[in-house]
Image (cartoon, rainbow, N blue to C red):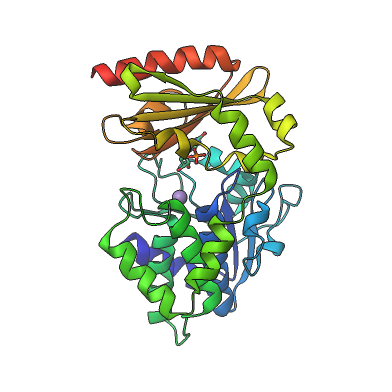
């Protein structure tokens, strides 16, 4: 069992690096911070790495201020653990920390995971990587005399699960998800406070950007496909940061009758990042993988070396193929 292999590997290691993906989201940060706290309770030396800045909205999590950036990549660890990364590339420049470590592990829930580490704890039925971390923390609790039921761990895992399930509303939300969350509340999560911090804390710039992006909405295939775009000009006009593009895609997805929503974000004049959401007909993970990306059946993405208009043409062709299957 991979989970037991992971626990053994933790026991065999004194220095451990945790690495999460570029443009980190709530699951990336929450699952990493939770595992960091658990491993530190065991007396391990733990560093968390992320190539990109931590969005302000997650700064309330205990320990995020100690996450290391890509400019500090010289240490060697006994064990390097990737969290919420479907492939090596998702770690960005921080993948070099895994390359240099003695052993590696990969904790993830993406269907597109490429099993790139020595130990691969991959469960595509988990709603979030945080859900798998909860189980691993339970195993660590059982195999030591350490009580892992701390508020800091609970808050971090709750952040991971609440964000990746869209507040317990997406199809990945399972009975197990709710059972885990029940435990987290028993461990001390204040649901009202966390909901305010995570979901009712938009910046004025995010709302301004939302207004601009909604104006770009186009509908195709009899209202089944909704596409929006975000140009750099819009970002500048709204004064929004990269992290403030998150969540906007849901407004296209939430239109009645929409089966597939896409947001095309201009990274530079010749590079576009595409975010995808699907209701039930199209496997957007498969679609994203055709362009070198990945994700889940219902939420996926990729980056393509094309200007936004050409990226949309190639996306529309792929969407047509998938609808005709
Ligand atoms: P989002 O649209 O929220 O950025 O991403 C939705 C899902 O797709 C996430 O699970 C994320 O991990 C995955 N995803 C987004 N962009 C990429 C990408 O460029 N490569 C891979 N492998 N996965 C991606
Ligand atoms: Mn995730």
Image quadrant in which you'd find residue 255 = top left
Q: Residue furthest left?
A: 325
**Residue 166 to residue 78: above or below:** above
Quarter containing the C terminus: top left
Judging depth in this view, the residue of 81 and 50 nearest the camera is 50
**Residue 249 to residue 99: above or below:** above
What residue appears at the point 50 percent right and 74 percent down from the top-left corner? 190
Q: Residue furthest bottom?
A: 145
- Is any atom of residue 209 visible in this view? yes
Q: Decide if residue 278 is on the left or right side of residue 106.
A: left
Judging depth in this view, the residue of 229 and 128 nearest the camera is 229
In the image, residue 79 lies at what x, y percent?
55, 60
**Residue 102 to residue 53: above or below:** below
Q: Decide if residue 195 is on the left or right side of residue 58.
A: left
Quarter containing the N terminus: bottom left
What residue appears at the point 59 percent right and 62 percent down from the top-left corner? 197
What residue appears at the point 33 percent right and 15 percent down from the top-left corner? 320
In the image, residue 92 lies at what x, y percent?
61, 40
**Residue 184 to residue 30: above or below:** below
- Is any atom of residue 102 visible in this view? no
Image quadrant in which you'd find residue 173 = bottom left
Judging depth in this view, the residue of 298 and 28 nearest the camera is 298
Judging depth in this view, the residue of 123 and 214 nearest the camera is 214
In the image, residue 34 lies at what x, y percent?
53, 67
In the image, residue 216 lies at what x, y percent?
55, 23
What residue appears at the point 46 percent right and 39 percent down from the top-left corner? 250
Image quadrant in which you'd find residue 324 = top left
């Amino acid at each position: 069992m991979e989970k037991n292999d992971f626990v053994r590997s933790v026991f065999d290691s004194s220095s451990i690096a945790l690495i999460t993906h570029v443009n980190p989201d709530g699951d990336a940060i929450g699952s990493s911070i939770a595992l960091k706290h658990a491993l530190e309770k065991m007396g391990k030396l733990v560093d968390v790495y992320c190539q990109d800045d931590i969005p302000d909205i997650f700064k309330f999590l205990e320990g995020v201020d100690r996450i290391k950036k890509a400019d500090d990549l010289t240490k060697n660890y006994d064990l390097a653990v990737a969290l919420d990364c479907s492939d090596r590339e998702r770690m960005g420049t921080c993948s070099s920390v895994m390359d240099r470590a003695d052993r590696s592990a990969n904790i993830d829930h993406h269907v597109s995971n490429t099993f790139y580490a020595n130990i691969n704890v991959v469960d595509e039925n988990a709603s979030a990587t945080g859900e798998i971390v909860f189980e691993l923390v339970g195993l660590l609790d059982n195999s030591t005399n350490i009580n892992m039921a701390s508020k800091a761990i609970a808050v971090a895992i709750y952040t991971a699960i609440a964000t990746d399930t869209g507040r317990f509303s997406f199809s990945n939300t399972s009975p197990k998800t709710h059972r885990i969350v029940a435990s987290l509340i028993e461990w001390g999560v204040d649901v009202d406070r966390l909901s305010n911090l995570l979901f009712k804390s938009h910046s004025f710039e995010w709302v301004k950007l939302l207004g601009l992006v909604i104006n770009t909405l186009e509908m195709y295939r009899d209202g089944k496909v909704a596409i929006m775009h975000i140009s750099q000009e819009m970002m500048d006009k709204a004064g929004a940061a990269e992290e403030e593009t998150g969540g906007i895609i849901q407004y296209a997805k939430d239109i009645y009758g929409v089966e597939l929503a896409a947001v095309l974000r201009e990274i530079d004049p010749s590079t576009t990042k595409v975010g995808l959401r699907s209701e039930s007909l199209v496997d957007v993970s498969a679609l994203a993988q055709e362009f070198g990306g990945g994700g889940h059946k219902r939420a996926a993405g990729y980056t393509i070396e094309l200007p936004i208009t050409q990226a949309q043409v190639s996306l529309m062709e792929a969407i047509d193929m998938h609808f005709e299957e």
